[in-house]
Image (cartoon, grey):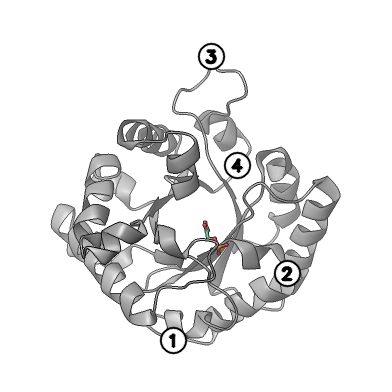
Amino acid sequence: MSRKLMVAGNWKMNKNLMEALTLASQVITRAKKTSGKVEIVLAPPSPFLHTINSMSKDLGFVKVAAQNCHYEQNGAFTGEISAEMLKSMNLAYVIVGHSERRKYFNDDHSVLSKKVTAVAGAGLGIIFCCGEPLDVRENNNHQSFVQTQLSDSLFNLSAEEMKNVVVAYEPVWAIGTGKTATPEQAQEMHAFIRKIISEQYSSEIANNCTILYGGSCNPANAAALFANHDVDGALVGGASLHSDQFLQIINAREFLPVR
Ligand code: 13P
């Protein structure tokens, strides 16, 4: 079985309602012209999730993801959204562990591990983000840093649950900076992530796990990143806010061979 190719757009806290619906409809219209072999994931702000999910439901390869959720199922947590709620909206994925959540909202290992458990328990897919800050890379500790992120927050999942996980390697120094990891840096880390998943679970689970690159991915650098054996797609921030750029990244993934 070849593993799933994916290009996901994390819109973060951008777009008002009309802008969000316009962008979603542009992406969906253009997605119809693709072969469907690349799964396209839209992660809009939470108020727009339900409408955008309804807009995309006729295209099986266009899915919608929440950018975050709480780890409790319900209760007195004003302003929060549970994985169960997202499940009831038939969403496909929840992004867990984005570096902005880690930095600004104190999503540490113990919180993330509970979120991972809650999302898996609700039966939703997880897009789990990991990645090192600049000083860690400069000190050549990036592999052990990412290994700790995965083992502390993700590897409490069962093998069955792990089959619904997409890993997104997003080096913090590349996010929103215009500074992309080189294709070699991305490949090296993706291969390492696949190796530790294989050691923790099995080579089959590791080989079937979709691993995305994130961090200043754009139409100019996407093809070179995707040309690497272990780079299955991208989690795109800024460029996903423009349908033409996002579609160019999807096209870059489409025209490279399936693994
Ligand atoms: P940029 O593509 O804007 O660097 O953002 C990447 C990201 O954080 C996706 O989750």
Give the side of residue 130 with respect to residue 26, left or right.
left
From the image, tell me which residue sits under label 1. 257
Structural crowding at the residue carrying mark 4, measured as other residues with C-alpha within 10 Å and reported as few (<14), some (14–19) or many (≥20)? some
Which of the marked residues, 1 or 2, is nearer the chain's N terminus?
2
Which amino acid type is marked by label 3?
Gly
Which of the marked residues, 3 or 4, is nearer the chain's N terminus?
3
| Alpha carbon distance from label 3 to label 4 | 21 Å
Which of the marked residues, 1 or 4, is nearer the chain's N terminus?
4
Q: Are marks 1 and 4 in contact (CB under 8 Å)?
A: no
Q: How many marks?
A: 4
> Can you give x and y, in whole percent of width and height, for residue 131 in the image?
35, 57
The label shown at residue 90 is 4
Structural crowding at the residue carrying mark 2, measured as other residues with C-alpha within 10 Å and reported as few (<14), some (14–19) or many (≥20)? some
Q: Are marks 3 and 2 in contact (CB under 8 Å)?
A: no
Choose between 139 and 199: the one closer to the eye: 139
Compared with 115, 191 (above or below) is: below
- Which one is closest to the eye, mark 1 or mark 3? 3
The label shown at residue 75 is 3
Give the side of residue 151 with respect to residue 225, left or right.
left
Structural crowding at the residue carrying mark 1, measured as other residues with C-alpha within 10 Å and reported as few (<14), some (14–19) or many (≥20)? few
Q: Which residue is situated farthest in the right direction here?
A: 18
Q: Dot 4: what SS?
A: loop
> Can you give x and y, in whole percent of width and height, for residue 29 in the image?
77, 69
Which of the marked residues, 3 or 2, is nearer the chain's N terminus?
3
> Can you give x and y, in whole percent of width and height, for residue 44 in the image?
66, 49
Name the residue located 55 percent from the left edge and 36 percent from the top edge.
87
Which amino acid type is marked by label 1?
Pro
| Alpha carbon distance from label 3 to label 2 | 38 Å
Question: Ligand 1: does it lie within 8 Å of the C-beta at label 2?
Answer: no
Q: Are marks 1 and 3 in contact (CB under 8 Å)?
A: no
From the image, tell me which residue sits under label 2. 243
